[in-house]
């Protein structure tokens, strides 16, 4: 309820009346005047109430009268009355019904009461009510009221004093509040203040309004009083204390700063009065030095209450009036800094620190200091000094002179507080350290232990000692208090400055962003002023801050404190970074880094930095601040033990919990402020690397670090505390690098550079030892790359360039990670969805793939392995999108070398297989050639045979692909070709590619063929074989695609070149035996030398080329130089055939046969394809296909051929030319055959050549078998000379012996008479010839004799096997099959030529049978030659190698003669057979009377058979020759007779010799001879006396011989007595007796006139001798004798006269 409401007024009136009544009652007796006054007052009030509507205003007007009774009542000095009056007066005051005059009276009355010491509290209350309820009191009255309160403050009563003090404070406040209110009222009215004439007069207040004047006077007097001068306005002051005065000054200055700032008069007071006063009062403190009690001039001691209040005033002055008092503040601040000095009393330092703290929480103020002092040229660097002072203050607390008794430290020199102070500390001296560690936060450094207290809330400076206004004595400061305040001050200072500057920076950045958005073209210009201030502030404070913070960080034992210190360092580092102040930024970062690492850890980056810092000495008023090095003995909890990362192995190092905490700060710094780190990344990362190393974190997938065990040395020991932290740390580490994606490009480059140089150091360290290297940098480069894929281009080069260096490092682990990082980056970058996509950004794609290619230059296998594995993965995931990157990728796959080991090659090969199976269609056709080259290089590598073989398979697949996609490939290649052509022309060069003139698609094929060609001469036989088969198959299957001119290249550059190489390699190959092929593989003896293995290759190659010539003959013949090619091919065949290897030579002949089976292109229209060797059945007139491929695809073959040949496939026009060319080809082949034959069958010349090469039977057989086919083509011009050549070869071939180890396979067993295939073929060849002559024209028949000659030569072999040069051959019968010694040199076995000779003989007989009458046969004396040849076996008879031979010879002779003799008789007159007869006679002679003896084991039956043959011959003579004696030369007949004669006498030599013991009597034969002889003798056809003479001679010889034999027998018989005679003698006598009986028979049959008388005489003379034999004992002889004597009876007739007549 307000005081002016009607109810309140009514109540007031009632109350006043009641009061007056009470007063009148009280004063009734003692003080009548008062009573009266009271009563009149009642009336007055009632009157006023009745008369006036505005009762309060009326009351105020009449207040003098209304108040009067109460004033009088106070004058009574009666307590009760006084109290009643004062209450009433207060009621009036509270309703503001007291006028100015009345108020004056009231004050005067109160003054009297005061002087009398009455109702002091009530007085104060009244004054307060009076002054606060209205403004009527001012000027002198006001001053009186104020003095009154002051005086009451100095009474003896404590309660009064305190109440008065409070009242004074309130009154002072009221005075100033009135002034503020007055200013408010006059706010709008602008006054012209009169000019102030130089403030000479202190009381110049004429310009001020009333309330302002009061305030001015009051403040001025307060200053006077504090300065102990008389007041001007507060008259009547009796006493005053400085402390109270200072408190009042402080409160005014603090509560009403506006007054002083807005009114010049007040400002003047501040400058002129307050500041000098403060400075003056400070003087004892300034001069005082602790412990200088003995100084000569006694100095006033500092007084705690005043000093403390002064500092409060100073704080207020600085806070509010800094702008007015720049110079003064400089002095104050310098003083403050001095008070922190170590020589000042402890309490003084404590309050000074509190004051400094108050400044530190006001960053804007600090900024002003910086602007006003530090940035002015000749001014004290106040801001810097404050910070440094705080720093040195903190340092000084640790460097205590007498550590032993830290309790006594703070006691003032003569103070009484020392005892209590000791007690307050609880006595934890330096000794009490241990107990407090766990419980209390503290700092501990080199044995000094300082506890840490909570002194104020962060950001506010709540002081303890500055508030101790009641204390007179200096308080005892607990240990650690000053430290705690200083610590808070430092933190607040950092927090304030950084947050202020960062706020302003943020505002500026916002403005800049806005400006850029609105003016995109203009450059934003920041106000330089602000930046300069910020930079100056940081420059000024960073050294001191760093010194203090580092020391505190080192000394801190409390996690929270450590956290705060680190946060301060972190924010400072970040701020410096943002402002671009590199040195301080690096210094703060270095400090954090050092704190993260174990003490004294050798880390060069940090030491060099620290050195540059400690070079700057900061001097703070003569006291230098060092950056204190960390104390070694730390009472921190050890959480990890690990290895230091250094090149020299050292012991272990320990990490404490604080190190880990620092590490986390460091991570935080890098994570949140990475953008401002710039070059300090180096420091940060180096430190992190060392920590990671000590903690044993190892990189895992993608570069993230995971806890892993150390590899060597004492392994890392981690406590559980840190174990749980590790995943967090590793996570933060990863996030740190993930956040690099938010850095701008420049910062990112700083980060990458730092990582690279770290990595270089790690590489340096890892050289030359096999220690585990630090992989931190490499792993983090990887992580950074992976998260910055969107702008990978800008960091790709430095990143990959460095990783490539890492990949070449000798340390395997280092390398391995370099490769891991590099390949992971490449894979990720290719998989990343770039914008624009890689497919459209060729340049980027090549950039990304390039490092992959560079890896190929690294020699280490593990790196190449990694490279190839990643290629494999890239192919599997991005193979389809490689496009222009293919050449690079293929280059990598193909960069294999033989020294790289199998596994590498295997991996690379997997890649290639993938490419060939999956990606050929997606790659540009220009790369196909590269694929071929790469596949070829895998074929040529020699590490892994299977890969070589498989790669040849790949080449086949590639060729298939070319074939199937031919059309598409051609189009694309031709497009590319045009582009290349254009480029080449622009440069003025010629297009340079292999096989250039050929079209690009053909070039592709040629490259493929060339590669296969290279593989065909690989050192490994299996590869050669496979490549050869593939080459010929591809040419066969896909050759149709080539254009005609390309075939020229194929033939000359591919096929013949290959043949030449193979020939050279084969002829020079090593003949050493290869031991088994490693492991348990046995090599077959036919492949156990390099030479034999090459032989196989040669065989394959030659066969392949021949086949191509065969199948593609038609196509090749259209090339201009087919004849040359044919010659070259034949030459190759010849050299192969003559090679010293059976396999090769045989195969060469097979190839020869193959190309000779080619039929001449048929001349009729339909069959142009027969040439290629397609069976006619398959040929559709429009479409045929090459050999090795399924017939006819949709685009018919003819179309394709047409396309490539440019013309329809037509048979060449019928004409002579082609026939001639053809015969030229065949004659060329004949010459080759002839040369091959002569060279291969020519025997070795000298005995020295005994081991020279001897061709094998199959080879010779094949050679001879070629002839018949060849002959068909050369028949027309085959001459005698050629026949002669042929004969030489046939003869040579047959005479070649075979090796004894081969003989069991080739030869039949000796007893079987079978021809070898070679002999068969020789005879076949002659047979072909003979048949050709037979049907040929007349002129061919002159060749018959030559054929006979050849055959007869062969017949001779039966008795006289041919010699092969001078080689010793064993007869086949003697080659011991079963006993061939191992390792003995092979014996050469002459073949069993008997069957061959016999077969030849049969051929001769047949042929002669057919041709006996031919003129040539007659003229060339063929019959004579036949007989001459047969003479040999006939003469040898039993001595023949084979018994069948002479038997066949005889039967042949008989056959030939039965044909030939009639012809001979017919041509007798021509004399062409003259020379034959003696030959024939000799032949008979040699056969019938052979020198050879029959074998011992001949059975009787055999003997009789043989004898029958002899008989047959004699019969031939008797039937075919003797009857025609008149056509036969006489000598011949004579020879025959002599022969018969010889046969008829059983020719036994008279002397018995050993040789003749075994001769058997051919009785039957003798008989026939004898009969023939007799028949011929007694025949009446005897034409010439000579013949008769011969036969008579023969008879008489025979008879005479018989006589002798008989006589000798009789004698021997007699002599021998009982002993039987030798068998042969008995046989002989029997034979003689038989001959006699035969003679008797003949004589009986003959005409008597034909018998010579002499003969009869001889016959009769035998009789007595015969009779004498009758006594013989042998029954056989007796029976023969009986037969001989029997016929004599026919001649026993009585003698007739005629005979006698005849005799006479």
Image: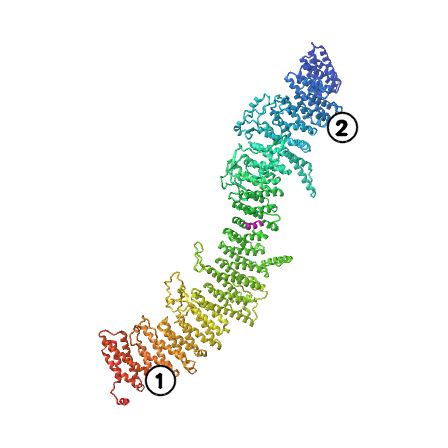
The main secondary structure of the magenta stretch is helix
Where is residue 247 drawn, in percent x and y?
66, 23
Q: Tell me if I can see residue 589 in this picture.
A: no
What residue is shown with label 2? 189
State the residue in front, 1177 or 1351. 1351
Q: Is residue 1259 found left or right of 532 in the rendered image?
A: left
The dot on residue 135 is none
Secondary element under disc 1, as helix, strand or loop, is: helix
Name the residue tied to disc 1.
1586
1596 vs 745: above or below: below
Q: Look at the image and tell me in which quarter the N terminus lies.
A: top right
Return the residue found at the far front: 296
Question: Magenta segment, which residues?
Answer: 850-858
Measured from the top left, where is residue 82 in percent x and y? 68, 14
- The residue nearer to you, when weighing 934 against 1482, is 1482
Given residues 1543 and 159, the one toward you in this image is 1543
């Amino acid at each position: 309820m307000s005081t002016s409401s009607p109810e309140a007024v009514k109540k007031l009136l009632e109350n006043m009346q009641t009061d007056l009544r009470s007063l009148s009652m009280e004063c009734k007796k003692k003080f009548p005047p008062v009573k009266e006054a009271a009563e009149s007052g009642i009336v007055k009030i009632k009157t006023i109430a009745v008369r006036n509507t505005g009762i309060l205003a009326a009351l105020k007007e009449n207040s003098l009268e209304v108040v009067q009774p109460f004033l009088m009542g106070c004058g009574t000095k009666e307590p009760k009355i006084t109290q009643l009056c004062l209450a009433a007066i207060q009621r009036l005051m509270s309703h503001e019904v007291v006028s100015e005059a009345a108020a004056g009276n009231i004050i005067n009355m109160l003054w009297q009461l005061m002087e009398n010491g009455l109702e002091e509290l009530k007085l104060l209350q009244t004054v307060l009510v009076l002054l606060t309820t209205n403004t009527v009191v001012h000027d002198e009255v006001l001053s009186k009221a104020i003095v009154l309160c002051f005086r009451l403050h100095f009474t003896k009563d404590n309660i009064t004093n305190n109440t008065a003090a409070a009242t004074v404070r309130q009154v002072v406040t009221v005075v100033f509040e009135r002034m503020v209110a007055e200013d408010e009222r006059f706010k709008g009215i602008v006054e012209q203040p009169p000019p102030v004439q130089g403030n000479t007069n202190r009381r110049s207040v004429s310009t001020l309004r009333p309330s302002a004047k009061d305030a001015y006077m009051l403040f001025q007097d307060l200053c006077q009083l504090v300065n102990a001068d008389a007041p001007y306005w507060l008259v009547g002051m009796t006493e005053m204390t400085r402390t109270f005065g200072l408190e009042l000054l402080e409160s005014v200055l603090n509560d009403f700063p506006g007054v002083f700032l807005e009114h010049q008069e007040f400002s003047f007071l501040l400058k002129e009065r307050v500041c000098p006063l403060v400075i003056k009062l400070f003087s004892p403190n300034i001069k005082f030095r602790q412990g200088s009690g003995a100084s000569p001039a006694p100095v006033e001691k500092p007084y705690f209450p005043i000093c403390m209040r002064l500092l409060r005033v100073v704080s207020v002055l600085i806070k509010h009036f800094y702008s007015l008092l720049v110079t003064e503040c400089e002095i104050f601040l310098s003083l403050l800094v001095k008070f922190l000095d170590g020589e000042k009393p402890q309490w003084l330092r404590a309050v000074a620190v509190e004051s400094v703290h108050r400044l530190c929480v006001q960053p804007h103020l600090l900024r002003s200091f910086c602007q006003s002092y530090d940035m002015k040229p000749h001014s004290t660097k106040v801001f810097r000094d404050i910070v440094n002072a705080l720093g040195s203050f903190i340092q000084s607390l640790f460097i205590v002179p007498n550590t032993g008794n830290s309790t006594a430290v703070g006691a003032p020199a003569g103070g009484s507080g020392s005892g209590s102070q000791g007690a307050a500390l609880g006595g934890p001296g330096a000794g009490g350290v241990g107990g407090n560690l766990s419980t209390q936060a503290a700092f501990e450094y080199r044995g000094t232990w300082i506890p840490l207290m909570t002194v104020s809330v962060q950001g506010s400076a709540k002081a303890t000692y500055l508030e101790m206004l009641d204390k007179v004595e200096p308080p005892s400061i607990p240990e650690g208090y000053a430290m705690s305040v200083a610590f808070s001050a430092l933190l607040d200072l950092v927090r304030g400055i950084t947050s202020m500057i960062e706020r302003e920076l943020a505002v500026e950045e916002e403005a800049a962003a806005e400006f850029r958005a609105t003016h995109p073209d203009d450059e934003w210009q920041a106000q330089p002023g602000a930046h300069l201030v910020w930079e100056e502030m940081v420059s000024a404070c960073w050294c001191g801050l760093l010194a203090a913070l580092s020391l505190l960080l080192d000394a801190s034992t409390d996690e929270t404190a450590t956290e705060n210190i680190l946060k301060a360092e972190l924010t400072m580092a970040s701020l410096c970074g943002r402002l671009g102040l590199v040195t301080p930024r690096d210094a703060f970062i270095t400090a954090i880094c050092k704190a993260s690492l174990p003490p004294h850890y050798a880390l060069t980056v940090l030491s060099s930095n620290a050195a540059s810092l400690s070079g700057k000495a900061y001097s703070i008023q003569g006291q230098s601040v060092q950056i204190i090095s960390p104390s070694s003995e730390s009472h921190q909890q050890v959480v990890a033990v690990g290895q230091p990362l250094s090149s020299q192995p050292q012991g272990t190092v320990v990490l404490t919990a604080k190190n880990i905490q620092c590490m986390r700060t460091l991570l935080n710094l890098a994570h949140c402020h990475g953008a401002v780190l710039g070059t300090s990344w180096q420091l940060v990362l180096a430190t992190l690397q060392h920590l990671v190393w000590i903690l044993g974190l190892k990189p895992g997938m993608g570069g993230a670090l995971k806890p892993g065990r150390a590899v060597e040395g004492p392994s890392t020991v981690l406590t559980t505390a840190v174990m749980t932290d590790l995943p967090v740390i590793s996570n933060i580490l990863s996030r740190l690098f993930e956040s690099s994606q938010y850095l701008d490009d420049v910062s990112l480059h700083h980060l990458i550079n730092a990582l690279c140089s770290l990595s270089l150091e790690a590489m340096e360290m890892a050289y030359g030892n096999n220690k585990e290297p630090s992989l931190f940098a490499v792993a983090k480069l990887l992580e950074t790359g992976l998260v910055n894929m969107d702008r990978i281009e800008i960091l790709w080069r430095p990143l990959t360039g460095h990783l490539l260096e890492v990949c070449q490092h000798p340390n395997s682990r280092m390398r391995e990670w370099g490769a891991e990082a590099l390949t992971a980056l490449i894979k990720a970058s290719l998989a990343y969805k770039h914008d624009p996509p890689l497919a459209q950004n060729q340049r980027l794609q090549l950039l990304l793939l390039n490092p992959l290619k560079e890896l190929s230059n690294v020699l280490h296998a593990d790196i190449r392995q990694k490279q190839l594995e990643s290629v494999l993965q890239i192919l599997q995931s991005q193979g389809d999108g490689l496009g222009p990157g293919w050449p690079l990728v293929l280059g990598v796959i193909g960069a294999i070398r033989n020294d790289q080991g199998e596994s590498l090659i295997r991996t690379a090969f997997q890649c290639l297989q993938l490419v060939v199976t999956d990606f050929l269609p997606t790659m540009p056709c220009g790369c196909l050639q590269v694929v071929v080259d790469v596949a070829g290089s895998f074929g040529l590598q020699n590490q892994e045979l299977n890969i070589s073989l498989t790669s040849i398979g790949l080449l086949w697949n590639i060729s298939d692909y070319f074939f199937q996609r031919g059309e598409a490939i051609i189009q694309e290649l031709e497009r590319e070709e045009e582009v290349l052509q254009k480029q080449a022309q622009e440069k003025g060069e010629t297009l340079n590619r292999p096989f250039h003139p050929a079209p690009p698609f053909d070039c592709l094929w040629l490259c493929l063929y060339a590669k296969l060609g290279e593989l065909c001469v690989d050192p490994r036989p299996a590869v050669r074989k496979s490549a050869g088969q593939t080459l010929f198959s591809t040419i066969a299957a896909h050759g149709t695609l080539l254009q005609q001119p390309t075939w020229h290249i194929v033939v000359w550059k591919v096929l013949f070149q290959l043949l030449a190489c193979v020939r050279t390699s084969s002829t020079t190959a090593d003949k050493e035996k290869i031991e088994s092929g490693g492991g348990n593989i046995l090599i077959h003896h036919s492949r156990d030398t390099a030479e034999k293995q090459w032989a196989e290759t040669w065989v394959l190659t030659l066969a392949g080329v021949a086949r191509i010539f065969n199948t593609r003959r038609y196509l090749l013949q259209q090339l201009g130089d087919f004849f040359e090619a044919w010659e070259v091919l034949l030459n190759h065949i010849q050299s192969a055939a003559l090679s010293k290897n059976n396999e090769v030579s045989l195969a060469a002949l097979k190839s020869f046969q193959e190309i000779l089976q080619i039929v001449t292109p048929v001349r009729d229209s339909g069959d142009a394809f027969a040439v290629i060797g397609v069976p006619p059945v398959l040929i559709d007139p429009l479409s045929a296909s090459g050999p090795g491929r399924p017939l006819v695809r949709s685009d018919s073959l003819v179309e394709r051929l047409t396309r490539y040949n440019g013309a329809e496939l037509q048979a060449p026009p019928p004409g002579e030319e082609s026939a001639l060319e053809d015969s030229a080809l065949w004659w060329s082949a004949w010459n080759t055959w002839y040369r091959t034959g002569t060279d291969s069958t020519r025997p070795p010349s000298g005995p020295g050549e005994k081991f020279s090469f001897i061709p094998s039977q199959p080879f010779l057989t094949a050679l001879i078998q070629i002839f018949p086919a060849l002959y068909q083509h050369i028949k027309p011009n085959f001459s005698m000379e050629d026949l002669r050549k042929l004969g030489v070869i046939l003869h040579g071939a047959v005479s070649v012996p075979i090796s004894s180890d081969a003989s069991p396979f080739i030869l039949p067993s000796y007893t079987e008479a079978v021809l070898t295939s070679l002999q068969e073929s020789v005879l076949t060849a002659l047979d072909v010839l003979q048949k050709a002559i037979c049907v040929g024209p007349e002129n061919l028949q002159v060749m018959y004799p030559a054929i006979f000659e050849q055959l007869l030569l062969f017949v001779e072999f039966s008795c006289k096997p041919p010699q092969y040069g001078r080689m010793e051959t064993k007869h086949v019968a003697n080659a011991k099959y079963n006993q061939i010694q191992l390792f003995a040199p092979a014996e050469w076995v002459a073949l069993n030529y008997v069957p061959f000779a016999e077969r030849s003989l049969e051929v001769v007989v047949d042929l002669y049978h057919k041709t006996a009458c031919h003129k040539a046969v007659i003229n060339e004396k063929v019959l004579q030659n036949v007989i001459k040849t047969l003479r040999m076996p006939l003469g040898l008879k039993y001595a023949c190698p084979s018994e069948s031979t002479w038997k066949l010879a005889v039967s042949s002779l008989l056959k030939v003669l039965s044909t030939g003799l009639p012809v001979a008789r017919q041509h007798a007159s021509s004399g062409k057979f003259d020379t034959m007869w003696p030959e024939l006679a000799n032949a008979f002679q040699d056969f019938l009377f052979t020198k050879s003896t029959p074998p011992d084991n001949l059975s009787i039956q055999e003997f009789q058979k043989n004898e029958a043959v002899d008989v047959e011959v004699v019969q031939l003579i008797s039937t075919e020759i003797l009857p025609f004696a008149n056509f036969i030369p006489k000598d011949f007949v004579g020879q025959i007779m002599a022969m018969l004669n010889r046969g008829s006498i059983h020719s036994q030599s008279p002397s018995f010799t050993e040789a003749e013991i075994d001769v058997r009597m051919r009785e039957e034969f003798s008989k026939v001879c004898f009969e023939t002889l007799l028949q011929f003798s007694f025949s009446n056809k005897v034409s010439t006396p000579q013949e008769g003479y011969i036969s008579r001679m023969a008879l008489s010889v025979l008879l005479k011989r018989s006589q002798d034999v008989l006589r000798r027998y009789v004698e021997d018989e007699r002599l021998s007595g009982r002993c039987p005679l030798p068998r042969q003698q008995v046989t002989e006598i029997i034979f003689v007796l038989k001959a006699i009986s035969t003679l008797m028979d003949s004589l009986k049959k003959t005409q008597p006139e034909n018998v010579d008388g002499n003969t009869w005489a001889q016959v009769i003379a035998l009789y007595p001798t015969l009779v004498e034999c009758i006594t013989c004992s042998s029954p056989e002889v007796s029976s023969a004798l009986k037969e001989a004597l029997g016929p004599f009876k026919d001649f026993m007739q009585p003698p007739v006269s005629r005979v006698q007549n005849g005799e006479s």
